[in-house]
Image: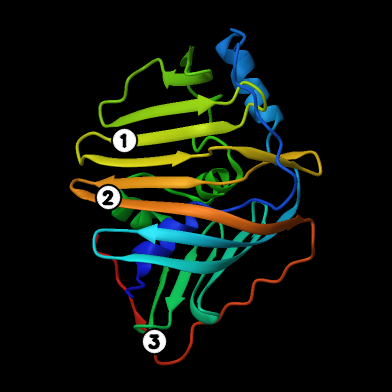
Amino acid sequence: MKYNLKIAIVILLVVTSCKTNKKVINTSNVTKISTKKIINKHYSNSFNQKTVNARLTVRYRGKNTATSIGVKLRLEKDKTIWMSATKLGIPIAKIKITPKKVVYYEKIKRTYFNGDFSLLSKWLGTELDFKKIQNILLGQAVLNLKKEKYNSKTSRNLYQLTPRKENELFGILFFINPTNFKLNKQEIRNKKKRQLLSVSYPNYKEINGEQFPKNINILATDNKNLTTIKIEYRWVEFNKKLTFPFSIPRGYKEIKLKQ
């Protein structure tokens, strides 16, 4: 098995949910409303808890790698995202993200990374920061929809949002569920580099009044390479007091990303 920085970071982009009774979302007969109202309802349904503590299974498939690992997720809203990955119960990697820093280490090759978001953004081909990662985890739009003007229409029983002003480098699409106004899918495409990041949320569950993704699927392409990730959640709890233990083991080699 090959565990590297790319797997950990891509896995990082996709987690959080629950184990409760399923709530069926009916998206038939979508009512046409204004773009402004769609966006306002999306933000009025934003995640409103202080912390998330969850366990899940992540299935990863890349060009030369296919694996399934267990992940512990701890998230303190707007402050810290922490993950610990295991294989057959054995710890293999850990990652901690704060608004200013990403720190990661893996035990197979005994390497670690300690850097900011500018390097990761360039490596992944799209601008990345703490808020965007957190929004992906919570089923929120990665961009601030109130800062730009968007057009909307109904498509496949969903509200589809696209920027009024087309970006020469990036293509952006948002599909919003008309029942809970959370995302069904968001897509960012780098036209020049032929890169695509697509995050979809097939269904949601209601937990303590919150609409949370039941599953999250990621598809990432980089020219000819395709990466897919599927998340299966075992349980989740909110508002527990959390700790985020992290220290890089001695003797590990630092990973330097090319600029």
As drawn, the label of residue 252 is 3
Depth check, mark 3 against mark 1: the one in front is 1
Tell me where residue 89 appears, x and y as whole percent.
55, 80
Label count reads: 3
Q: Residue at x 45, y 41 (%)?
A: 199
Callout 3 secondary element: loop
Q: Quadrant of the C terminus?
A: bottom left
Q: Is residue 40 above or below residue 68?
A: above
The residue at which mark 2 appears reads as 226
Percent of width and height locating residue 38: 60, 18
Q: Amino acid at mark 3?
A: Tyr
Helix, strand or loop at mark 2 = strand
Of callouts 3 and 2, the N-terminal one = 2
Please give the name of the residue rendered at 56% of the width and 55% of the height, measured from the top-left corner: 232
Badge 2 local density, few (<14 within 10 Å), some, or many (20+)? some
> What number is the disc on residue 189?
1
In the foreground, 241 or 153: 153
Q: Amino acid at mark 2?
A: Leu
